[in-house]
Amino acid sequence: MAAIDCPRCGKPVMDYARFLREAEPQKVLPCGGCGALLARSRLVWLLLVVMSVGLAALFTVVAASGLLELVTPRWLALLLGGAVLGGWVLVTNYLGYRLVGWKPARER
């Protein structure tokens, strides 16, 4: 996918395992192909805002609908909420990997 390719060499910047371990919105990382220093596109912030609003909306709808009252053991409701939160974080991370590109880091 072109969005994750290096703007200098055209090769993939990194695989997902490395991305999961190292990539952060403001961190500068070297390209795995050519070694050029790269930063994330500013679109990463838009993705984080959109996904955060979506998660807040999901939890608001669930809380307002009374679905949590149907889960009688409270620990089970917390476990399900934690699983949804963890899954949402992983989906957000993967979308960032697949959709948000890289740009050359400014020399300091």
Image (cartoon, grey):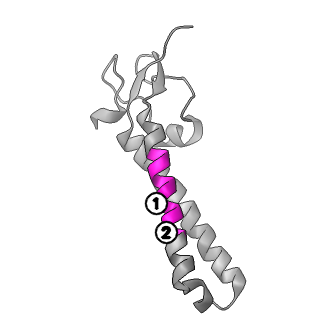
User: Is 66 located above or below residue 13 in the figure?
Assistant: below
Q: The disc labelled 1 sits on which kind of residue?
A: Gly
Q: Disc 2 vs disc 1: Cβ atoms closer than 8 Å? A: yes
Query: Which of the two residues, 32 or 85, is positioned nearer the viewer here?
Result: 85
Q: Quadrant of residue 82?
A: bottom right
CA neighbours of label 1 inside 10 A, class few (<14), some (14 to 19), many (20+): few
Q: In the image, 108: left or right of 5? A: right
Total label count?
Answer: 2
Q: Nearer the viewer, residue 19 or 77?
A: 77
Amino acid type assigned to the residue bearing label 2 in the image = Leu
- What is the magenta segment's predominant secondary structure? helix
Q: Furthest-top residue in view?
A: 108
Q: Position of residue 96 (x, y in %)?
A: 43, 43
Residue denoted by label 1: 54
* Residue found at x 54% / y 71%: 60
The x, y position of residue 36, in whole percent, is 45, 15
Residue visible at 42% across and 30% down? 41
Q: Residue at x 34, y 29 (%)?
A: 5
Determine the residue positioned at 44% across, 51% down: 50
